[in-house]
Amino acid sequence: MADFFTAVPEPIPFEGPDSDNPLAFRWYDRDRVVGDKTLAEHLRLAVCYWHSFNWPGNDVFGDGTFDRPWLDPSLDPMAAARTKMAAAFEFVEKLGVPFFSFHDHDMAPYGGSFAEERAALDALTDEALGHMERTGIKLLWGTARLFHHPRYMAGAATNPDPEVFARAAAQVANCLDVTHKLGGANYVMWGGREGYETLLNTDMSRELDQLGRFIHMVVEHKHTIGFEGTLLIEPKPQEPTKHQYDYDSATIYGFLERHDLVDEVKVNIEVNHATLSGHDFAHEIATAVGLGIFGSVDANRGDDRLGWDTDQFPNSVDSMAPAVYEIIRGGGFETGGFMFDTKLRRMSIDRTDLFHGHIGGIDTLARAFLVAHAMWEDRALESLRDDRYAGWSGAEGQAIMRGERSLDDLRDRVTAEDLDPAPVSGAQEALETLVNRYIERVR
Ligand code: XLS
Ligand code: NI
Ligand code: NI
């Protein structure tokens, strides 16, 4: 353990729901067995490198406010990157979660030729490997920053210039290689600049074909190097671009179908991105599960009254539990997990604030998981769902679904039987109260 977060000398303990210690978990008892796995194995929690260690707390109106000494531009970039890494691993180790995630250029500095940037990434990921072996912390996913540098202002894969496409491809080759070296469970592609500001200068169908070609090249490279993690696209409808092609899970599914990529790529769903696309988080999960492309989650939420990606820590069991329920209903995570793609508020300038944000978020997820798992075990919602659709298990329901009935057949039957089924209650209020009862009682 290094010595940046000295106000937190020990790993965060679990003390149970009655604890008042702000630097203890009240719900995340990592070794508690729930069903067939421990809470740690179910949740697969990860800390992000970028917002937590590589963001100074700046916004469009003001400079950074955070105490991140390694971001001082007068420092030697490689030495500063190593200091940042030591602090990041100290934090993850003290928090006691199993995974982290990173972008190539929040771990390695920009500067010099492409070959020099590649060498820096190789050296720093070797250093990360040392920290991982020492601490047992694993990599949930790696990803390339294809939206930050000015060369990508008009997109990376969808850029009008094939030389920018080539540069992006080379960058992803490097980033996939090091993600493979670190044993990453997944590789994420977030297309923040893959979209348009105005259709007046944009050939949208050409750009979408470029994106399809790019993703195919990523798939080929994955197989060439033998990377066994899952490739994930992270949907987001807008911000920073006015319209982003990876709008939501259903849009990505259509894109994957068109480009014959459905068996190769899944989605990484972010809570606030779901909100920005006009959906509930639970809807995005259920859509991806239903289409067979559910992969992983970025757990950060938005603010109900702000229309941008505020990346706040989850703090509402009420809103998280129904979404976690959909994850459990879909069979849980395979290679994915809950990643904190979260930002502190700009005024949260104490070093311990990073702990408070993560502890609160982790406890929210742990408690939401316990609620959702209890509802699933009791089949409280499922038995009602089963009753609701019971008719489809009957002979006529099955014959319809097998394609053995035409409109004419059904007209004949409705006429003969004068079929006029009575409406049945959807019981929404009773179900909402049932969920609240689980939230009140779970321990
Ligand atoms: C931005 C995205 C980004 C991805 C990784 O809104 O959430 O942080 O998760 O590039
Ligand atoms: Ni986001
Ligand atoms: Ni994200």
Image (spheres, rainbow, N blue to C red):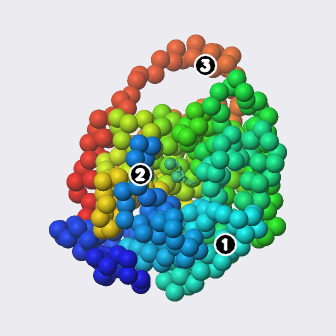
Q: Is residue 404 above or below residue 413?
A: below
Q: Which residue is mark 1?
A: 120
Residue at position x 74%, y 41% in the image:
159
Residue at position x 62%, y 15% in the image:
411
Number of the label disc, if any, that sits on residue 63: 2
Number of the label disc, if any, that sits on residue 413: 3
> Disc 2 to disc 3, how far (Cα)?
72 Å
Residue at position x 59%, y 80% in the image:
127
Q: Is residue 366 visible?
A: no
Q: Is residue 18 left or right of residue 278?
A: left
Q: Is residue 342 above or below residue 387?
A: below
Q: Quadrant of residue 101?
A: bottom right
Q: Position of residue 290 (x, y in %)?
A: 58, 45
Q: Is residue 439 left or right of residue 95?
A: left
Mark toward the start of the polypeptide (3 vs 1): 1
Marks 3,1: beta carbons within 8 A? no
